Amino acid sequence: MEENRSPKHVVIVGGGITGLSAAFYLKQSAEQSGAPLKITIMEKGDSFGGKIQTLKRDGFVIEKGPDSFLARKLPMVELTRELGLEDQLTGMNPDSRKTYILSGGKLHRMPPGLMLGIPTQMGPFMRTGLLSLSGKLRAALDLVLPKRTSPEDESLGHFLERRLGVEVLGQIAEPLLAGIYAGNTYNLSLRATFPQFHAIEQKHRSLILGMMKNRKTGGEESRTLPEVARNTMFLSYKEGLETIVHGLIDALDNVRFVKQCGVARIEQADDGYRVIREDGSVEEADGVIVALPAHGISKLLGSSFPEVKELDRIEYVSVANVILAFDEKELGRELDGSGFLVPRREGRFITACTWTSKKWLHTAPSGKVLMRCYIGRSGDERWQDMSEDEIIRAVRHDLKEVMGITAEPLFTEMTKLMHSMPQYPVGHLDLIRGVRQSLADKMPGVLITGGAFLGVGLPDCIRQGKEAAKEMTEGLQVSSK
């Protein structure tokens, strides 16, 4: 009789990495339990994978969206293994470990021993030219300052200023940490962006002492990682990040993919939900996973679930990147690291530059150089009012003044990532918890997830997709009893 059950139908709205991961783990659970399940993925665009986009050009492997992921965050490594793609992983070039920060118009090497911008070796930190003596002494006060006892969330910027001082925040921590979110650290929630900092302060009192201890235990924990992930901070794939997208699509062989399919709204029906497309057609579903940006979720559910409008408090920053390819012999300088970061106070057009072909040896043919310059952050989105030619000229101007590069690029590629960087406000975790609880009460069987919620990195999105799949599977099992 079990074989005669009609399959439950789950619709996933959004075909980015979160939605694809949710589909993969839903399918896996259904196969393990033997429960019949029909899965449909609806994507408004004309391709799947979201912001992941790998371009092959003239022997170069170019990432137009994300370019790598943190090796220590296991959800992506585990998914890679489950897809049979572990042999495709590749780590950073060990000769590219140096990173620079622009200060006073000159590149200064980031002191060895920094972990997420926090010093764990005081010798190199005290010798760096990035900070004044007073800035270094203010940071050292962290060793004796008491811990904060208030249970309230605070901004990342206020936390780092409180522990290490405004100079360390502006010169090192802000360009390094805020670069992940393209945000203003004073507007980002500590608990939602770097909860480990809060945990370290509560456990060890001193951020520096706590990070030193974590560094030692982290070395021991790295032995449990796959071999390719043990001696590198970031990972990618030999043929680019689209490798995992293609792997997921191949694994979802009995899943229905529908692209160029915008969804207008989701409504409750007598026995489940109606997913109404922008063209007016309707899809009946027993459960729905919405893996869209916060503003997209708000538009989709707003008529049935007004509380979702709270998600509109999550602002998004638009960013762009410019890829430049060069002949190595014409560059005029040797690249001896992974690139450089640009603090706000430097007033530059670019926010960072990755020396891609030095950091990732698979990305350029022999004798060629690939660079990627980042543009835009919270409070500085002037590039949106410029033409592509103007943007590329501004990028090349900065490269000339910072690195002395006057060579003509072999080619350039520009990618605009509009409204792509969610800004987690102070109190973000409470906001998300409240919206999700209200949704569970009013529209059980509809789940919301993705980069707007609990992490913007690729492994975070995969983890959230997996968690949504688990919650949906449990919900469907309860409803079928």
Image (tube, grey):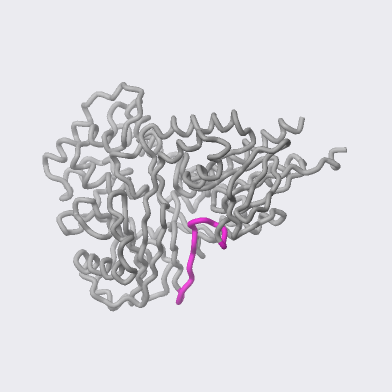
Which residue occupies the foreground of this view, 151 or 90?
A: 151
By secondary structure, the bulk of the magenta-drawn segment is best described as loop
Image location (x, y in percent) of residue 63? 44, 63
**Residue 129 shows in this picture:** yes
Is 47 in the magenta?
A: yes
- Picture residue at 64% right of the left edge, 45% below the top: 25
What residue lies at 32% left-to-right and 36% top-to-bottom? 211
Residue 203 lies in what quarter of the image?
top left
Relative side of 475 to 438, left or right = right
Q: Position of residue 307 (x, y in %)?
A: 50, 33
Q: Is residue 24 visible?
A: no
The residue drawn where x is 21% and y is 44% is 125
Taking 188 as reference, is 237 left or right? Answer: right
Query: Does residue 448 appear to the left or right of 192 in the view shown?
Result: right
Q: Quadrant of the N terminus?
A: top right
Q: Position of residue 243 (x, y in %)?
A: 55, 60
What is the span of residues highlighted in magenta in the rendered image?
46-59
- Depicted 203 relative to depicted 476: above or below: above
In the image, residue 222 sits, relative to residue 400, either above or below, namely: above
The percent coordinates of residue 430 (x first, y second) are: 44, 30
Q: Is residue 397 magenta?
A: no
Report the number of numbered marks: 0
Quarter of the figure with residue 315:
top left
Query: Where, quadrant-wise, is the C terminus in this rendering?
Result: top right
| Relative depth, front residue between 446 and 101 | 446
